[in-house]
Amino acid sequence: MKTIATICVLLVIVASLLAVSSTVRADDRPVRFLGISKYYAGYSSACIFRIDDFVVNPENIYTITFSAKSKNSSFANYQMELTSHIISKYPDVRLVVGLITNGGSGAEGAELWEQMNMLVRTYGWEIASHTRHHSLPPRSIDDIIGALMDIEGNITGYRVYTYIPPYGKTSSGEARLLSQHGVRIIMLSTPMQLLLPRNWDRVHITVKMSDKLPWGLFLHMMHRVENVIGGTMIIYTHATSYDWRSAESLLKSFDKAIKAVKDNKTWITVSSELYRYELERKMIRVEQVNATSYIVRATKQLDFDPVPITLTFKVKAQVEDVRCNDTRLPRLESPGYRPVPGYTQRGDILLVNAYPDSIITIILKQ
């Protein structure tokens, strides 16, 4: 028994020495991988600006009329004023636009479709389907799927990821039908979205902006909460007199909301980008090759265009260069909101934005 006890004590001592040795070696590594950032560029939370009731029918560009339950309602449309205001004053802020297509293409809507193309290609906005005719459920296949066809047929190479049901209501089977046609996100208007879509983490707070609501204080409070818990805030409104007394009132409110969330902690993004980042983040595996190199690989084949994922490292010295597959990555003074390959060093923390299936090599100054 005495011999067994002695052996056990020795084993404990050896194990302790090995653990200490391992810890020392880990601490001595010049580069140590810490993990994949939950949000792009190490932001603490995410924010999405969603605007419903954009149109591509010239007849509705200044006044838009809805028919629901045999009743017509008309509203002034401030779509053009809002678009001009955002791209001129906040070109880095992207919106998710709920578009009513009216079954349209053709010469009469060509100029507005061209504007949608420009918003997507140049400014990174997302065009979400808001159906063809803005009808109440139950909706026809033409109303639901026809709108997807209109958008994808008029914006070259574009895929619709997001559906915004009019009046915030869907009918039985609508989500399944949309999923079969490639839609992955349904954005409702409920204040707390827990599982929509289920790939997003934590609570998603929806804040409605309107002249009719005291939204400002609520937005500030919820934004602070999101920065602590790491959640997503969706700020939404209609670009019409349904929510606003005037275009000026709408634009001033946007100024106020954007100022509140532009705090260097919040990733202002769009729903499809956040969705893809989250899916990709869960599929990525990072393996160390040597002291300063890592392989980044996806464990599954992606069925969407990838976005750069942010990898977090702890480094022992100033970074001189970061290479991705032997190509130098740019040093980013500011990561911005649109994910791009590059790197940023903050003290001993290095953030590297890279696509899957790449080899990252970090070169430190001697």
Image (cartoon, rainbow, N blue to C red):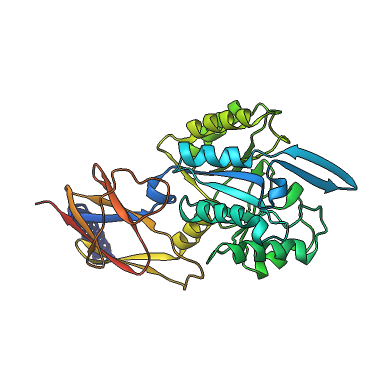
Which corner quadrant holds the N terminus? bottom left
Q: Is residue 176 visible?
A: no
Q: Position of residue 114 (x, y in %)?
A: 56, 56
Q: Nearer the viewer, residue 239 or 139?
A: 239
| Residue lying furthest right | 70
Q: Residue furthest left?
A: 366
Kindly indicate the quadrant of the structure image that contains residue 82: top right
As rendered, which of 298 and 35 lies closer to the eye?
298
From the viewer's perspective, is residue 225 above or below residue 287?
above
Quarter of the image for residue 51 reads top right
Looking at the image, which residue is at 59% across and 54% down?
A: 111
Q: Residue at x 77, y 66 (%)?
A: 141
Which residue appears farthest toward the front when viewing the image? 107
Query: Residue 201: x and y, percent?
Result: 54, 51
User: Which quadrant of the view contains residue 235?
Assistant: top right
Q: Nearer the viewer, residue 283 or 122?
A: 122
Residue placed most toward the observer, 288 or 144? 144
Q: Is residue 210 above or below residue 365?
A: above
Give the left or right position of residue 306, taking residue 200 as reference: left
Q: Position of residue 348 (x, y in %)?
A: 24, 45
* Residue drawn at (50%, 46%) of the image: 94
Count all numbered tags in the image, as a single digit: 0
Question: At which x and y percent is residue 258?
Answer: 50, 34
- The residue drawn where x is 50% and y is 60% is 276
Q: Is residue 341 visible?
A: yes
2 to the left or right of 68: left
